[in-house]
Amino acid sequence: MALLLSMPGGSEWILVFFLLGIFLIPRIFYLIALQSTLDTISVENRKMAPSNVWLQLIPLFGIAWHFVIINNLADSIKAEANSKNIRIDELRPAYSVGLAMCILNCLFFIPILNVLTIIASLICWILYWVKINSYKRILMAAKMYSFGQ
């Protein structure tokens, strides 16, 4: 740390590492949650490979890929729930809040609008993450129950 501060532009590097930590670490945990949810779903009901969620880390491409993840994850959860006779109230689980999040993320590139949408996007992201974890717990509980019989 002292070496970074003594280098020309050292304080900028600390800021870069700080911002990476603030934005990248939660994103990694989010992607782990998505991947583990897809891992919970049986192979025949998965609409995408669990490892494909990591493609979202590719700059710019990841913004479009997030729409694909939201779509495939909703369909995968629904297919798994149908095959296991699990009642889920949503037609496409977590899709609405996920779609709202993705659209709000796209609005980030429009000046002035980005200031207004960043908080809404963050709220939708948290809500989506919580919903996906909730569905994962439901699917895991059903899987444990079926193993117990």
Image (cartoon, rainbow, N blue to C red):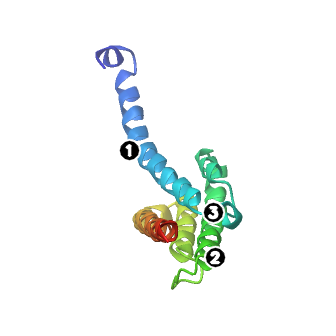
Q: Of the numbered discs in the image, which one, if any, rests on residue 22?
A: 1
Query: Residue 8's x, y, as percent?
Result: 39, 16
**Pointer 2 or 3: first along the chain:** 3
Query: Residue 79's x, y, as percent?
Result: 65, 74
Q: Nearer the viewer, mark 1 or mark 2?
A: 2
Asked whether residue 110 appears in the rendered view, the answer is no
Query: Residue 81's x, y, as percent?
Result: 58, 76
- The image quadrant that residue 16 belongs to is top left
- Alpha carbon of mark 1 to alpha carbon of mark 2: how far? 39 Å
The image shows residue 52, relative to residue 7, as above or below, that is below
Q: Quick one: 140 or 31, which is closer to the camera?
A: 140
Give the amino acid type for the residue marked by disc 3 in the picture.
Answer: Ser
Asked whether residue 53 appears in the rendered view, the answer is yes
Q: Of the numbered discs in the image, which one, if any, rests on residue 83?
A: 2
In this figure, which residue is indicated by the disc labeled 3? Answer: 42
Give the amino acid type for the residue marked by disc 1 in the picture.
Answer: Ile
Per the image, label 2 sits on a secondary structure element best described as helix
- Alpha carbon of mark 1 to alpha carbon of mark 3: how far? 33 Å
CB under 8 Å between discs 2 and 3: yes
- Alpha carbon of mark 2 to alpha carbon of mark 3: how far? 10 Å
**Pointer 1 or 3: first along the chain:** 1
Give the quarter of the figure containing the N terminus. top left
